[in-house]
Amino acid sequence: MRARSSSLKARTLLRRLTTGVAGVAFVSALVLTLNACSVDPGGAPAGSSRTPTAGPTSTGPSASSPSTPDAGAPFNRTAHSADDPSSIWVVVNKARPFKPLDFTPPDLVVVGVPHVWEPQLRKPAADAVVAMFAAFTAETGLKMQSQSAFRSYATQRGVYDQDVTASGQAAADTDTARPGTSEHQTGLAIDISALPAKCSLAACFGETTQGTWLATNAWRFGFLLRYPADKVPITGYTYEPWHFRFVGIELATEMHSNGVSTLEEYFGLPAAPQYK
């Protein structure tokens, strides 16, 4: 109360002086006094809206997470294209192949994380993977590794042909993308496994500590679990708890906040259960 009374007097005198011809030095002194009276014991300006920052949790942004967008700003669904193959929001599925089919991202870099095959991703996705892996280890004491990341059109053709030979085309089409329709070709998708390896590229990965943490926290770093178990009729692929797609923190946060789990649903695109 005493500080508020002193502040009120100082403000009143300051208004009188600034409408007259008082000396600049005296006014400056009063400004200093006014500022001193307007600071609370905690160091924040009196009447400010600053509140203590909550510590990191396993389900929300933490000190190890990249910056999150302003929750009060309206979300711009047209900020990036869903059609341009170089866009971080591009939607690629069985009904939406790359144009051109052999598209290669221009900004691929090696991702500095443990791996089975040396991973390459586009720079924003690579940085986010490094941050996400570091946060997982800091929060759990365990480790993850990259199983597979960018795959070119030619590489995907080899993977698909091998799967067709092993299990037939009908079976291959449920869990392996045909060349020119794989998210791995965007340079924004990564398959993740436990380190040491456990349930790699299998549905049981979703029950591991790595799988459950990723399902809960990947959005904090701009990633989606791209092929959820309950969205097979929309995505066209069986449940893949190891496959994560980078879309940026803004879109990942928007989708998480609104309970939307697939890009097809968010952008109002047709489901893609099979090839045309």
Image: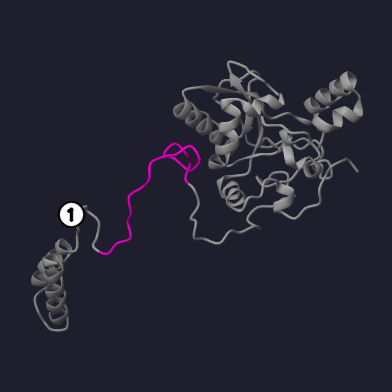
Disc 1 crowd, CA 10 A, few/some/many (<14, 14-19, 20+): few
Where is residue 175? Give x, y as percent: 80, 30
At x 67%, y 35%, the residue is: 187
Residue that mark 1 sits on: 41
The secondary structure that most of the magenta stretch takes on is: loop
Q: Quadrant of the C terminus?
A: top right
Q: Is residue 58 magenta?
A: yes
- Give the side of residue 135 with respect to residue 156, left or right: left
- Residue lying furthest top: 196
Where is residue 61? Give x, y as percent: 47, 43
Front residue of 97 and 216? 216
Residue 110 visible: no
Residue 57 visible: yes
For the record, the magenta segment spans 47-67
Seen in the picture, residue 76 relative to 146 is either above or below; the reply is: below
At x 56%, y 32%, the residue is: 213
Seen in the picture, residue 15 relative to 225 is either above or below; the reply is: below
Where is residue 128? Give x, y as percent: 54, 36
